Amino acid sequence: MRVVEKIATDRDMKAFGARLGARLRGGEMIELIGDVGAGKTTLTKGIAEGLAVNEDVQSPTFTINRTYTARDGLELHHYDFYRLNDAGVVGYELAESVTDTHAVTIVEWGETVHDVLPESRIIITIVYRANESRELTMSVPSVFAYIQEEERA
């Protein structure tokens, strides 16, 4: 399923993320695609809100990854490979994360680790539009049908 959403403000981006995060069950892998400043971390903050993360979510650009405790025994694993040409040992960590059924894994700048990313992943592309708005396109594979069903409701 493909969902296209117009996002006018950072608040709208967080709200979309919160709605998505509330539907996640663990075991999902989300790849975020967009230019610098597109809103990937803002979207992740919203997803964290929907997962009931009680910590301040920050971009892992300099730390490469961050882990947060979430609701229902879940964790949010947030990776950012912007500064890496080679994932190195973090690629192995990511490979474990994407198979963890108690984790929601979010990856920014995933080109470096493309061979580690599962084929069945949610892909969200964020594109700048006029007046600083964004267009968000979300591709959801059938394995995550419960997200699709909720989106239609």
Image: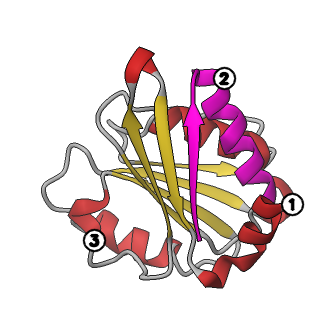
Residue under pointer 1 = 153
In which quadrant will I find the C terminus? bottom right
In the depicted view, which residue is nearer to us: 74 or 133? 133
29 relative to 44, above or below: below
**Circles 3, 1 touching at the beta carbon (< 8 Å):** no
Q: Which residue is mark 2?
A: 11
Amino acid under disc 3: His
Tag 2: Cα neighbours inside 10 Å, few (<14), some, or many (≥20)? few
Vertical position of residue 25 compared to residue 58: above or below:
below
Residue displayed at 41% across by 70% down: 93
Taking 90 as reference, is 144 above or below it? below
For badge 1, the amino acid type reads: Ala
* Left or right: 98 in relation to 117: right
Residue name at image x 35 percent, y 74 percent: 92
Local secondary structure at mark 1: loop
Q: CA distance from mark 1 to mark 2?
A: 22 Å
Give the magenta-colored segment's residue range. 1-23
Q: Point out the tag, 3 or 1, that comes first from the N-terminus.
A: 3
Badge 3 is on which residue? 114
Q: Give the quadrant of residue 141.
A: bottom right
